[in-house]
Image (spheres, grey):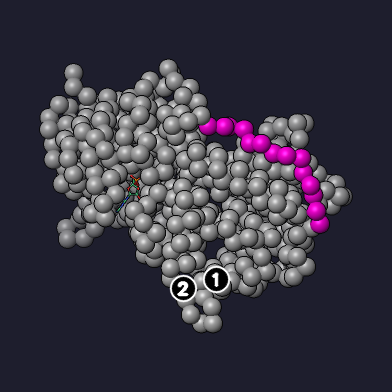
Amino acid sequence: MPPFVEMRDIVKIYPNGVVANRGVHFSVEKGEIHALVGENGAGKTTLMKILYGMEHPTAGQIFLEGRPVRIQNPHQAIDLGIGMVHQNFMLIPSFTIAQNIVLGQEPRRGRFIDFEAAARLTTELSQTYGLQVDPQARVEATPVGMRQRVEILKTLYRGANLLILDEPTAVLTPQETADLFRAVRRLVAEGKTVIFITHKLVEVKQIADRVTVMRHGEVTGEALRTADVSEADIAQLMVGRKVLFRIEKPPQQRGPAVAQVRDLSYISETGRPLLREVSFNVYAGEILGIAGVEGNGQTELAEVLSGLKPPTTGQALVNGRPVLGKGPRQVRQAGVAHIPEDRLTNGVALDASIADNLVVDRYFRPPFTRRGVMYPRLIRRHARDLMHRFDIRAASEESPVKSLSGGNMQKVIVAREFSSEPALLIAAQPTRGIDIGAAEFVRQQLVQKRNEGKAVLLISADLAEVMSLADRIAVMFKGRIVGIFQNGPDITEEELGLYMLGLKQQSPDEIETLQ
Ligand SMILES: Nc1ncnc2c1ncn2[C@@H]1O[C@H](COP(=O)(O)OP(=O)(O)OP(=O)(O)O)[C@@H](O)[C@H]1O
Ligand SMILES: [Mg+2]
């Protein structure tokens, strides 16, 4: 029997000359979960956009169950039963979930949209596949995990038999990931086929039947059975060398406190207390890791400290200077760098070039500007240098950031923040969405900053990452720090887990001595 989907000899050259796919062969069997992995910029999203009709191949052919097809646009893809959930969601924020799901194919009563029917259809679909959503809620008011379920339901409503999920777990908490996996298994049980892009090799082993590995636009591992390959094998096919899963960390040389945070509280616009009297120090030469289930105040902590949100009460000093309530530029001048969690909103200007994005925080200073004169050549050279060091793959430093692959966009921000020579680096989910090779590099850079005597505040939902990098670990639960630990062999995931779930907590005295 011919494969369900077969893409043969796919070549894609973008108008700017970037060769994203170089003769790719990709095939998927009906009813399987097929993982697609590869470095940032390897060409995964491009290949899937071709299958979904959003991009046209420069050469190559697509077959569905042995029949050659031309997929000119997403409309035709949907007619052929192909649906795609993108890396960056495409929902209408002011619409309700039900409205988004039926958008373009609304049930009608006479000339009018039948909103009740829309809500009913949404509920039915949601129950069939175990993808829980609230049909009446507005998308703008729903958390990211639910938005993703909406995107999936939307493709199912349109009759998708093949679902392409582009890095669905990058934005999810471990709990939400487990829920998603259950739903994906249910989809397959109902006869669907799923293509799943991810950077997390554990997930490949957990959820996928087979895996295709890409590197530099080519296939380096074709439809391998996941039962037959190890994570290390896949990693090697991805990056062309062995990847270290362990980070070298020399003994700590701890200096004075760089950041001193006292009784910091933050109440949201809707009146919810998201930070409650948070106090801690970050010392020179230390990585303080913040662990916690997402949504327990970690994001707000980073945003308040970096000037993106005003605090309600409390104090924070960086090198003795107050930084709270100052606005991002002044906070930067006080020596704080911030890799934001929501990078597309807070991190980059999508239409601007890579070079411009890399200097937004410093173009007005020497060497880029002297006596009111700006030196574009230096800005471009600076960009080329950082692109080289951080392995940002793009046609040139003049390319707009929006033409980059998802992970390369992230690297632009990471490169800018690491190179700003901060006294305090706040890194929120710094390796999310970037490939294993680049993640290894970012982790080494975090340790490097620490070794140079900088203070690093690392916020990560990846407990393994926190445990491998941090010198001390603070656990947040419901906006509070409920425990601080000196990291070491006697700290276990299980123990931290109890604090993360609010089942255990240190006494205020204990916390104070460990601050
Ligand atoms: N619209 C575009 N115009 C020009 N070049 C593009 C465009 N979209 C992607 N590219 C380039 O094509 C290459 C492959 O990008 P693609 O998005 O397919 O990578 P990816 O494997 O999905 O990476 P990631 O893991 O970072 O999401 C990259 O070099 C990227 O810069
Ligand atoms: Mg991608």
Kindly state the secondary structure of the residue where label 1 is placed.
loop
Q: Name the residue under label 1.
A: 367
Q: Mark 2 points at which residue?
A: 375
Q: Can residue 126 be seen in this view?
A: no
Q: Position of residue 161 (x, y in %)?
A: 26, 34
Task: Please tell me which residue is depicted at 57% across the width and 32% down the height of the picture.
Answer: 244
CB within 8 Å, label 1 to label 2: yes
Q: Horizontal placement of 61 versus 345: left or right?
A: left
Task: Please tell me which residue is depicted at 39% across the width and 63% down the height of the picture.
Answer: 353
Q: Position of residue 207 (x, y in %)?
A: 43, 28
What is the span of residues highlighted in magenta in the rendered image?
A: 243-256
Q: What residue type is labelled 2?
A: Tyr
Task: Please tell me which residue is depicted at 51% across the width and 82% down the height of the picture.
Answer: 372
User: In this view of the protein, which residue sits in the foreground, 450 or 26?
Assistant: 450
Q: What residue type is labelled 1?
A: Pro
Disc 2 crowd rating (10 Å Cα; few below 14, some 14-19, many 20+) is: some
